[in-house]
Amino acid sequence: MRRCILFSRATGRITVGGDELIQQWQGSDDYLWLDILRDNADAEKILLTETFGIHTMAIQDAHRERHPPKYEAFSGYYLLLLKGLSPGSTETSFDTIQIAMFVGENFLITTHEEESRSINTLWDAVIEKPVLMEKGPRVLPAMIARNIVNRYLSMLMKVEIHLDELEQLMLQNDPTNEQLAQLTTYKTRLRIMQRVFSYHEQIFLALRADPDVTQNDFLQHEFNDAYEHLERADSLARLYYDLANDLINSSISLASHRLNGIMKILTIITAIFVPLGFLAGLYGMNFEYIPELQIRNGYFYLLGAMSTIATGLLVIFRVRKWL
């Protein structure tokens, strides 16, 4: 699916439509934003190469699903690959989608395989306020990048709430397998976020140093703002990763402590009953003659001895603070 916004530099008005706006844009000095929800990679490749002069290698990078985020300049345009959150992402299950942007002097092409809330938000904003395109298509990627980072920030705020709830539950009651599974999931997702943020940080640093950005105050402000938000998101992701890791380690430590307590009790019981079992086994042997068995009150003497041994061992354990 393809949709277009054509901004007329003469009138300051926009036109929203489809492929017909591409033909109207060609040969003019107007600004075009082409957004592609990818459903036919071959048709998209033909359009980008023949109409916009996009290099085939750049298109291949944009279509490669697991390609890391990157920034690469070409003659007359540059390619920007970013990782955004998928539309169905929640605080307990979030995935990323690749967003590719081809940015020229008078055009912006965004292409992605799934719906992007970051793009849709800016699309609606441009329709409501066409003045956003007045400074040219080069400012739009910075706004999209900021929307992407803000979505990560919003998601991380929800993660914080869930981690706080899990922490309170685990302090009040014994941790459950479900809670530990949630923490492990958070650790995995937060580690992915940190890797994505690391790529994005390199890209934003490169963009901030680009001459076209440094010479444009508005563009420089937008990328600086996006970078600052990214730094905060990266800091929060690391903080929550450490928190999830600490909660898991605490749960393991508590479980180990409880297990040690149980093993100590079992060991004490065993230590008490070993001598008692020895005495019971000794006088329970089937010999015809055992002298002590002839003692009139031998049974009571044996019970007394066994009670004394058990009591003595308990006293020793108490004195040594093993109980």
Image (spheres, rainbow, N blue to C red):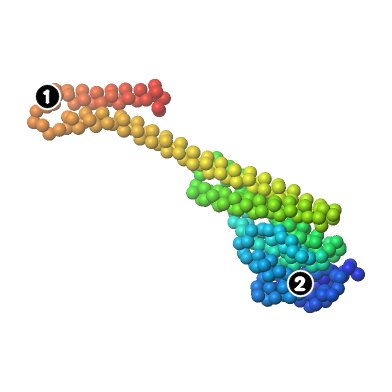
- Residue 113 shows up from this direction: no
Relative depth, front residue between 274 and 314:
274
Q: Residue at x 77, y 52 (%)?
A: 209
In the rendered structure, which disc, 2 or 1, sits on the residue that comes first in sequence?
A: 2
Tag in front: 2 or 1: 2
Q: Say which amino acid is labelled 2.
A: Phe
Which image quadrant is residue 17 in? Answer: bottom right
Relative depth, front residue between 277 and 53:
53
Q: Residue at x 76, y 60 (%)?
A: 141
Question: Taking 286 as reference, is 167 above or below it?
Answer: below
Q: Residue at x 35, y 35 (%)?
A: 266
In this rendering, position of residue 263 left or right of residue 1? left
Question: Taking 310 as reference, is 103 above or below it?
Answer: below
Identify the residue under disc 1: 291
Identify the residue under disc 2: 52
Q: In the current view of this chain or complex, which residue is farthest to the front? A: 75
Structural distance between the alpha carbons of marks 2 and 1: 110 Å
* Residue 8 image position (x, y, % from top left): 87, 70
* Residue 300 image position (x, y, % from top left): 21, 24
Q: Say which amino acid is labelled 1.
A: Pro
Question: Taking 151 as reference, is 126 above or below it?
Answer: below
Element type at mark 2: helix
